[in-house]
Amino acid sequence: MTYQLTDLGWSSFFQTQREAAPELTPYRITEIHRSRMTALGETGEATLTSPRLAAGELAVGDWVMVDPEMRIQQVLERKSLLQRRAAGTDAQTQLIASNVDTLFIVTSCNEDFNIARIERFLALAHEAGCYPVLVLTKADLCDDARAFEAEAQALDPMLTILTVNAREASAAEAVAAWCKPPQTAAFIGSSGVGKTTLTNALTGGDAATGGIREDDAKGRHVTTARSMHPMRNGGWIIDMPGMRALRLLDTREGIDSVFDDLAELEARCRFSDCAHDTEPGCAVRAAIEDGELDPERLQRWRKLRAGEAKNTETIAESRARERKFSKMVKGVVKGSGKRKGR
Ligand SMILES: Nc1nc2c(ncn2[C@@H]2O[C@H](COP(=O)(O)OP(=O)(O)OP(=O)(O)O)[C@@H](O)[C@H]2O)c(=O)[nH]1
Ligand SMILES: [Zn+2]
């Protein structure tokens, strides 16, 4: 199968980055393995190697420039980038997916519905540079789906919300309308909310297969591989299993854009480092007293910011810990050598 580059999401944004290097050809990465990448280009699917860039420096969705030996020579600047703190104790950043236009935040109209979590995902979308669309699933199993919708809409009157039964064909249609060809979409949300159901409907069942199973730290099998699949309407989906244990990283700006009302109020506090507690001239407290601001929203904002600071800070901390740990391991290895010789 051959493609026009524009079918794959190529645009002037990438074209202007294309250097005058006629021997290099653009490809879009659809799968990343340790030593090779699968990609799509004008001539169809290809297997690429990456002697210059480590697999961890590339993301599914990346546009790369490739030489005639099918080696990746360059990654083009990304329009958007989803990343997270890697699972486990070491706080490494992991690139999840790039050049995603629309991030569908999926939650169901039941216990999974959690305003604080939705705000976290919205912050992530803003930070990554993706357009967020909230998908409320299981409307059919709930007496008053509109109440959930209204609660979410109160976060932001401009937020796009689709309230659906993910098992009906009309749900996939509603979702597809927010990811027109040749745009790229990704789904994020807790387990069991309907991401796979929607993805399969959009792709015709091709996604959610071909994932690589790996053992996680606790020895459970988890599907961690991310991959890009064509949607039936001509758009693209990046399947990103493993995005459930999402941790925010460097999302300060994203958080502030979700809470822009609070950021605006804060700018009017008398003191620039106001903690909005007992300081005189605090615009945030004044808004709460006037009933214009929900004190719970202030709480959630504080919690999110505190979590974000913690995650960012832990990267430096964890590097220090790793150094300590590797010293310790060396000590233990020496010691065990002695015991073996007993
Ligand atoms: N009635 C109803 N059932 C739904 C809806 N959305 C999902 N389900 C069902 O809920 C179950 C879980 O849906 P999945 O699509 O597998 O959920 P998921 O988000 O992919 O879950 P993970 O793969 O664990 O992340 C399936 O049995 C679906 O058929 C919905 O809107 N209405
Ligand atoms: Zn204040």
Image: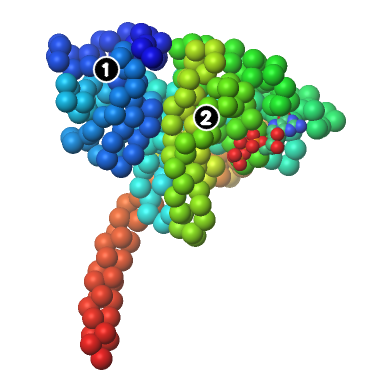
Residue at the image point whose x is 49% and y is 44% from the top: 223
From the top left corner, tell me how far across and down residue 218 is, in percent: 49, 60
Q: Earlier in the sequence, mark 2 or mark 1?
A: 1
From the top left corner, tell me how far across and down residue 220 is, in percent: 52, 56
Q: Which mark is residue 270?
A: none
From the top left corner, tell me how far across and down residue 237 is, in percent: 49, 24
From the top left corner, tell me how far across and down residue 258 is, in percent: 54, 28
Amino acid on which the number 1 mark rests in the picture = Pro
Q: As drawn, which residue projects farthest toward the bottom?
A: 342
Residue at the image point whose x is 43% and y is 31% from the top: 227
Q: Classify mark 2: helix, strand or loop.
A: loop
Q: Is residue 257 visible?
A: no
Q: How many circles with numbers are drawn on the protein?
A: 2
The residue at which mark 1 appears reads as: 26
The residue at which mark 2 appears reads as: 207
- Which of discs 2 and 1 lies nearer the camera? The answer is 2
Q: Which class describes the residues within 10 Å of circle 1: few (<14), some (14-19), or many (20+)?
A: many
